[in-house]
Image: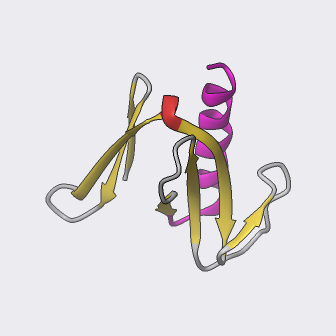
Amino acid sequence: VLGQNGSDLTWGKPTRNEPVNLETFSLKDVKSINLLVDNQVVDLEQPPDKGRAIALEFQFLKPIDPVKVPFTEIPLAVEWGKYLQSLISSH
C-alpha cells in the first residue's frame, strides 16, 4: 500500500483490516528512484513484461539504507515510479 500527502510518502503492508508496518519519508530526502524487477534495476521506460519480485527502491540524499516498496504489478510500479520521479526532479 502506497499513499502520498504533499511531499510525504507513506507505505505499509496491506491486510484485510488496515495497512500495518506503516513507514513515512519525504520525497525531499530522495536522491533517486529505481524500479527493481527480480532484484535487478530496470529502465522505467522499457520495463520487462514479467517478474516475480517487483519494487520501487528509494535512494536517499543522506547515507541511509534505501527503502524498497513492493508492488504486485510491473505497470503499477512503473506509473508510480514515473510520477514520483517527476516530483523529485522538480525539487
- Residue furthest front as drawn: 63
Q: Residue 73's x, y, as percent?
A: 58, 63
Q: Is residue 47 above or below residue 82?
A: below
Residue under the image location 52 percent in, 57 percent down? 66
Q: Is residue 21 above or below residue 79?
A: below
Residue nearest the observer in this picture, 39 or 61: 61
Residue nearest the observer in this picture, 25 or 3: 25
Residue nearest the observer in this picture, 64 or 72: 64
Q: Residue 83's x, y, as percent?
A: 63, 34
Q: Residue 90's x, y, as percent?
A: 66, 19
Q: Is residue 48 left or right of residue 84?
A: right
Looking at the rendering, the stretch of residues picked out in magenta corresponds to 71-91
Q: Residue 71's x, y, as percent?
A: 51, 62
Image quadrant in which you'd find residue 4: top left
Asked if the magenta segment contains residue 30, the reply would be no
Q: Is residue 49 left or right of residue 5?
A: right
Q: Is residue 57 above or below residue 2?
A: below
Residue under the image location 48 percent in, 60 percent down? 65
- Residue furthest right as drawn: 46
Residue under the image location 65 percent in, 75 percent down? 39
- Residue furthest left as drawn: 17
Image quadrant in which you'd find residue 31: top right
